[in-house]
Image: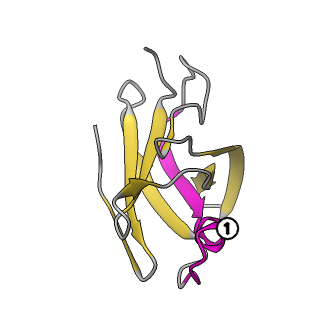
Amino acid sequence: MSHSPITCHVLDASRGTPASGIRVQLECLSLAEAVSDGLTIRSTNEDGRCTDLLSSGSRLSPGVYKMTFFTEDYFKVIGIEAFYPLVEITFNRVDSDQHYHIPLLLSPYSYTTYRGS
C-alpha cells in the first residue's frame, strides 16, 4: 500500500484509543522569509491515522515543514476542555526519498511526539 510521503498517527493516551476526526494541516515553511505554503488539510480516520495528506508518489523538497493538529474540536466532541487547542510540530525534512511519519500521543494536559517509521 502506497502512502503520502508524510503521514501521521494520533493516539489519545488518556483513553487508550485512536483519536479520530482531528483536522491536520501540513505546511512547508520558509524560515528565511517567515512565510508558509499551506499544502493540505485532512482529518484522521477511525484508526487515528492520516495517510492521505499528500497523494501517493508526491515529491517534496527537503525543507522545514509544520504539521498542525486541531485538537480542541476533538476534545469538545468527547466532552473534555482542551488545554492545548492545537498542537504544532515543526520538523526538518532532509531526505526527499524517505517517508516521514509523525506520531502524536495526546492527552488533555500533555502531548508527546517523535520521528516514527
Q: Quadrant of residue 91?
A: bottom left
Residues rendered magenta in the picture: 61-82
- How packed mark 1 is, by other alpha carbons closer than 10 Å (few <14, some 14-19, many 20 or more), is some
Image coordinates of residue 54 in percent, x first then y, are 61, 30
Give the residue displayed 48% in from the left and 36% down from the top.
6
Q: Which residue lies under the disc numbered 1?
A: 73
Q: Is residue 97 left or right of residue 84?
A: left
> Visible in this render: residue 62?
no
Based on the picture, tell me whether residue 73 belongs to the magenta stretch.
yes
Q: How is the image coloured?
A: secondary structure
Give the residue displayed 63% in from the left and 72% down from the top.
72
Picture quarter with the N terminus: top left
Q: In this view, does 107 lie above or below 7?
A: below
Q: Is residue 102 above or below residue 56?
A: below
Please tell me which residue lies in front, 63 or 1: 1
Give the residue displayed 65% in from the left and 73% down from the top.
76
Q: In this view, does 62 lie to the left or right of 81?
A: left
Instruction: Give amino acid for label 1.
Output: Asp
Picture quarter with the C terminus: top left
Q: Is residue 60 left or right of residue 109?
A: right
Secondary structure beneath dot 1 equals helix
Q: In this view, does 61 lie above or below 111?
A: above
Give the residue displayed 42% in from the left and 83% down from the top.
109
Image coordinates of residue 73 in percent, x first then y, are 67, 67
Image coordinates of residue 107 in percent, x first then y, are 41, 73
Q: Quadrant of residue 99?
A: top left
Please tell me which residue lies in front, 40 or 80: 80
Q: How many marks?
A: 1
